[in-house]
Amino acid sequence: MWKYKTPGIPDEDFERTDEVPITKEEVRVVQIAKGRLRPGFTVYDIGCGSGSISVEAALQVESSGIVYSIDVDPKAIELTKKNLEKFGVSNVSVILGNAKEKLSELPQADTIFVGGTGGDTRDIVEICQDKLKLGGRIVIGIILIETLFSVLESIKKLKFTSVDITQITISKSRKTSTGTMMLARNPVTVISATKT
């Protein structure tokens, strides 16, 4: 369905529900870029939600790579599976459960994306440090200030390098009866770093 090599599948192309979050298109593009993916990589998408990161990452790592999509919410898992099917993606393993428990069962990763974790982001980042290969990348999408502070402390303590903090503030156009207006979306902070 997505015939391009570049990431950036429009949000409206994904199956969506109000109960399950989606990483918005522009934020997703930045996160995928910060993950520095290539064919053959092993990737985790923790807190996969609608599966938008999983779909985009799977397309980047191609059939020689694999993505492990993890979420504790059965509705998110169901929606991720629908989107994988919709985009014809077959190199993704979808896992229902708590990431803190499930990560130990997975092979070492080249790139780890951490999204909605229900307040466990700091703990998950610390677990991921052991699951990430040397030279591997971690990319964390954050919307809460408190989470940002705790994750930065962990990243520093764990001695990650090439730490990059990018805040993304997007406005999208919407037609009105008299013209076009810009509507702001919530800012998202993306932390990316390398394990050395």
Image (cartoon, rainbow, N blue to C red):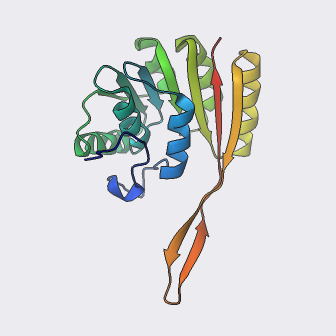
Q: Is residue 180 above or below residue 59?
A: below
Name the one closer to the observer, 81 or 185: 185
Relative to residue 62, is residue 27 drawn left or right?
A: right
Q: Quadrant of residue 93?
A: top left
Name the one closer to the observer, 70 or 65: 65
Q: How many marks?
A: 0
Image location of residue 44, percent across then percent down: 45, 25
Image location of residue 61, percent across then percent down: 37, 26
Report if residue 135 is visible in the image.
yes
Q: Quadrant of the C terminus?
A: top right
Image location of residue 35, percent across then percent down: 53, 29
Q: Is residue 132 above or below residue 138?
A: above
Report if residue 147 is visible in the image.
no
The extreme bottom residue here reads 178
Q: Is residue 29 above or below residue 156?
A: below
Image location of residue 40, percent across then percent down: 37, 18
Residue at image location 32% in from the left, 27% down from the top: 62
Residue at image location 41% in from the left, 14% down from the top: 106
Residue at image location 71% in from the left, 36% down from the top: 165
Residue at image location 42% in from the left, 54% down from the top: 19
Q: Quadrant of residue 132?
A: top right
Q: Is residue 16 above or below residue 110?
A: below
Relative to residue 93, is residue 152 drawn left or right?
A: right
